[in-house]
Image (tube, rainbow, N blue to C red):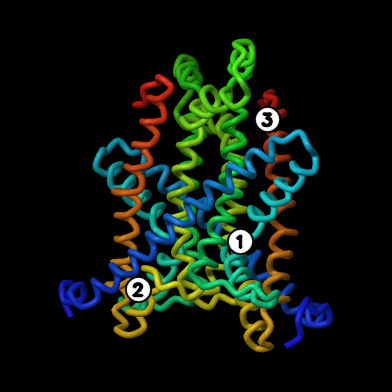
Amino acid sequence: MEMGFRWDFAYEILPQMLWATLNTIIAAGVGYAIALVVGLFFLLGQRTPSKIVNAINREIVEFIRSTPLLIQLFFVYFVLPQFGIKLSAWICGMITIGLHFGTYLSEVYRGALEGVSKTQWEACRALNFSTVYTYRKIVLPQAFPIAIPGMGNYLVGIFKDTPLLSTIGVAELFHAATAVGGYNYRYLEPYTMVGIIFLTLSIPAAMWVRKLESKVNIAQGKTKQ
Amino acid sequence: MSYFAFLAEHGPTLLLGTVTTIKVLVCSTILYVIISMIFGLMRLSKNPLIQGIATVYIEFFRGTSLLVQLFWVYYVLPFFGLSLEAFVAGVVALGMNFGAYGAEIVRAGILAVPKGQWEAAHALNFSPSKRIKRIIVPQIFPIILPPAANLTVELLKATALVALVTVVDLTFEAKQINSITWLSAQCFGTALLIYYVMARFALVPFLRWLEVVAARKVGREKV
């Protein structure tokens, strides 16, 4: 077998890899959208007046957060059909990623809400604002910038975890690389290209998150540190 | 087949896999701690070359996916004449990946020690090694241990990936049993429970204990 990096082979498989990259981006985007919503539900579960609901919610969040995403994927993919729920690999993957990262995002939301000083609430009550109005006009605009770095980091985090979807057969970038590599008995070029594609996407994304963070801080009248 | 019959038949296999998972966890924790210290210090170096190497390393490992790195180490390095055993490849990939995250924690921890502490140690004419050993390092531990604990729990979860490069760990055994028996709920459910118990009732209490010890060392009581 020829040693070293074969540029012609890399060039030949490039279109295939780029198409698969599109799937990876879609998977990350959809997974993130689900996680954002799921995170809200977990946040609500934490803030109910009922102590039992809060405790159950916390235990569920802990369980999801301390078990591997990989096995959660297998669990959803293999177990649901036994109960007669037949979902495609794509949907299973999106649900699992949404649930898994939803627990992380709920913590981000919680931290952001707690980051808004208590006196803001007291001032709003003194001014006789309704709870909805307080949230919409006073608390959330202040909480959002605190949440942005965490939210951005998990977007990048989800993007980097999408290769796990290949284990249940979602045709994303890593899956394509494994298929191409297996077909040609050459893993060097496909896997290296996957690495490079990930770098070229995630480093700018991380930089963009950092920029956004400082922008929001300036708009809020705070400068970083 | 009842769940107890399942446990009686396949429980020992899963436990054997758990032992491998713990081995992977311990080895990769040692490796990632060493790497984070080296690169965390390099990141703070005044020499632009050393700092640049550390920055590239950290950005590279944080910018790509762990699974990709793992497969690269296991399937691509042999092309360059370096064949690693699956277990070694898994530990190396995990250690290097988490080392990059850990380096940032170490860097932030060192920067978080107030400048006055350095100056005071200097003013008291402590030697550089004594300054680091007696003044700075004991103050770093309480700062970096909480984020390092989170990272270590993430590492425990990430060890599941080594099953994909044929390390016979808990995940691998669960997958294997699933493909023989098709009792997916039982085998993956049990695996999830074992991971949960390991994280929640062994790893986290141990790390919390370390935090308390480190805080007490510098005279801070940790609640």
Q: In this view, does A147 lie above or below A16?
A: above
Contact? badges 3 and 1 (CB < 8 Å): no
Task: Give the amino acid at mark 1.
Answer: Ser
Label 2: chain?
A: B
Q: Nearest the camera: B155 or A203? A: B155
Which is more N-terminal, label 2 or label 1?
Answer: 1
Res. A217 mark = 3
Q: Position of residue A117 (x, y in %)?
A: 50, 22
Label 1: chain?
A: B
Q: Is residue B135 above or below residue B162?
A: above
Q: Name the residue under label 2.
A: B174
Q: In this view, does A225 lie above or below B92?
A: above
Q: Mark 1 points at which residue?
A: B65
| Spatial separation of the CA atoms under disc 3 and disc 2 | 47 Å
Image quadrant holding the N terminus of chain A, namely: bottom right
Visible residue check, residue A172? no
Contact? badges 1 and 2 (CB < 8 Å): no
Q: Which residue is drawn at 34% across and 43% down?
A: B206
Which quadrant holds residue A185? bottom right
- Helix, strand or loop at label 2? It is helix
Q: Residue at x 74, y 41 (%)?
A: B51
Q: In this view, does A144 lie above or below B157?
A: above
| Image side of residue B58 versus residue B157, left or right | right
| Image side of residue A127 versus residue B108, left or right | left
Q: Residue at x 27, y 72 (%)?
A: B186
Binning the other alpha carbons within 10 Å of mark 2 as few (below 14), some (14 to 19) or many (20 upward) gives: many
Q: Position of residue B100 (x, y in %)?
A: 61, 49
Q: Where is residue A46 in the image (x, y as percent from the top left)?
A: 36, 41
| Spatial separation of the CA atoms under disc 1 and disc 2 | 24 Å
Binning the other alpha carbons within 10 Å of mark 3 as few (below 14), some (14 to 19) or many (20 upward) gives: some
Q: Where is residue A101 in the image (x, y as percent from the top left)?
A: 49, 54
- Helix, strand or loop at label 3? It is helix
